[in-house]
Image: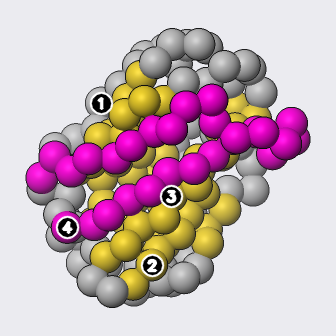
Amino acid sequence: MKLPERLRFAFIIAGFAAAVFTRPGTAAETLTEVSQPAGLHVSMYSELEPLTINQMHSWIIEVRDAQGEPVADAVIRVEGGMPLHNHGLATSPQVTGQGEGRYQLQGMRFHMNGDWELRLQIEHDGTTYRTVFNLTL
């Protein structure tokens, strides 16, 4: 399935390595980062378009292995916040599986404009993968 022309991010991550974007993304960009070839490919986009301050919304996360196959049995935890303001997310988002390597991140709300980061921890097949998505609202 091709991702809609929405806010989305993609990059490759490897076990126990954190891939961090050097510049924040915006709704008009797709960001890519490569850490190691044996990692996971993670795509993420907001279902709310345009992304609006103080509105609850969901994100779709797609996870694929190094061969491009969907990873359907991952456990994903999300944390985040505004590092420059030294605070976390205003909500406690939860991730549920939808099948075929797709997951829904529910309960998201950004309560102010600025630089945000979403940190994903992905448990799959006995390995912990980590990554950080940065965005500016």
Q: Which stretch appears magenta?
A: 73-99
User: Could you tell me which residue is drawn at 85 percent across and 42 percent down?
Assistant: 86
Amino acid bearing label 1: Pro
Amino acid bearing label 2: Thr
Circle 1 SS class? loop
* The N terminus lies in quadrant: top left
Estimate how packed mark 3 is, as few (under 14), some (14 to 19) or many (20 or more) residues with alpha carbons within 10 Å. Answer: some
- Does residue 31 lie above or below 16 as drawn? above
Q: Earlier in the sequence, mark 2 or mark 4?
A: 4
Circle 4 SS class? loop
Contact, CB < 8 Å: mark 2 with mark 4?
no
Residue marked by disc 2: 128
Residue marked by disc 4: 73
Q: Earlier in the sequence, mark 3 or mark 4?
A: 4
Estimate how packed mark 1 is, as few (under 14), some (14 to 19) or many (20 or more) residues with alpha carbons within 10 Å. Answer: few
- Does residue 130 lie above or below 96 as drawn? below
Alpha carbons under labels 4 and 1: distance apart: 24 Å
Alpha carbons under labels 2 and 1: distance apart: 29 Å
> Residue 5, position in %: x, y?
36, 28
- Does residue 52 lie above or below 10 as drawn? above
Circle number at residue 4: 1
